[in-house]
Amino acid sequence: MLEKLKKLGREITDLLFPISCLICGKPNVYLCTPCSAKLPRQKQQCLSCQKPSAFGKTHANCLTKNTLDGFITSLPYSHPDIKKLIQVFKFDLVDSLAETLGNIMADEIERQGLQDYFQEFVLLPVPLHPRRLNWRGFNQAELLAQKISQRFSTIIDQSLLRIKNTKPQADLDRESRKTNIAGAFALAKEIAGKKFLLVDDVATTGATLSEIAKLLKSAHASEVWAITVAHG
Ligand SMILES: [Zn+2]
Ligand SMILES: [Zn+2]
């Protein structure tokens, strides 16, 4: 019932505020194809040292048993148009933007030539705390994972739980982000030997992704990568 009401609410919002490209104003789409093609792309880098790296693979000397093995991203978050797109998706709860953003992520996987490599992986959307999920009505990371799953037929895994309702990371500095997110996640089942591709909308310092990587590695995941729409 609540879900239906929320959906109705979103449909009414769409009627009152007709959809248009967030960049050029063209009707009926949130991001038109020409504007999407013109967006600047993020160069792949090692999330640990933020220096360039082929396919976003973590440099051998940056890798510890707690870090991500690699990180893929598409767009620079510092660009005003990109920030606007993500914020409308995340804070204005526009779930229909997931299609556009999920396709941008899937395109990046293909551009890096990693679609075959990730066939052995399961997708793991960064979970929201149940209370936050209830308030938002959808998990933006889950919607993005669904789009990637549709493109590459990869399975979405649900082993990760969010057990701590943390403060929004965006309000905190680098050090506080680490403390805030520490111990926020737990595993619902045995994951030893599995390969994971974490999915989220934005990575800034990478504190959330690193916290999850640490948990998965300590439970003997064999490989952990992450993908986000934007970084910065
Ligand atoms: Zn446009
Ligand atoms: Zn590095």
Image (cartoon, rainbow, N blue to C red):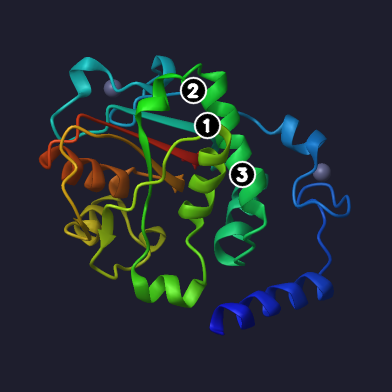
Residue 102 appearing in the image: yes
Could you tell me residue 45's position as x and y percent?
40, 24
The residue under the point 35% across, 47% down is 157
Give the crowd class for mark 3: few <14, some 14-19, many >=20 residues within 10 Å.
many
Helix or strand or loop: what does disc 1 sit on?
helix
Residue on which the image places disc 2: 115
Q: Is residue 19 above or below residue 115?
A: below
Q: CA distance from mark 3 to mark 1?
A: 15 Å
Could you tell me residue 171's position as x and y percent?
39, 63
Assess whether mark 1 and mark 2 are in contact (beta carbons under 8 angstroms): yes
| In front of the other: 195 or 48 | 195
The residue under the point 23% across, 66% down is 163
Tell me: is circle 1 under 8 Å from ligand 2: no
Assess whether mark 2 and mark 3 are in contact (beta carbons under 8 angstroms): no
Type of the residue with mark 1: Phe
Could you tell me residue 125's position as x and y percent?
40, 49
Give the crowd class for mark 1: few <14, some 14-19, many >=20 residues within 10 Å.
some
Residue on which the image places disc 3: 101
Could you tell me residue 117's position as x and y percent?
40, 20
Which quadrant of the structure image shows residue 166?
bottom left
Tell me: is circle 2 under 8 Å from ligand 2: no
Q: CA distance from mark 3 to mark 2?
A: 17 Å
Q: Is residue 82 left or right of residue 161?
A: right
Residue on which the image places disc 1: 152
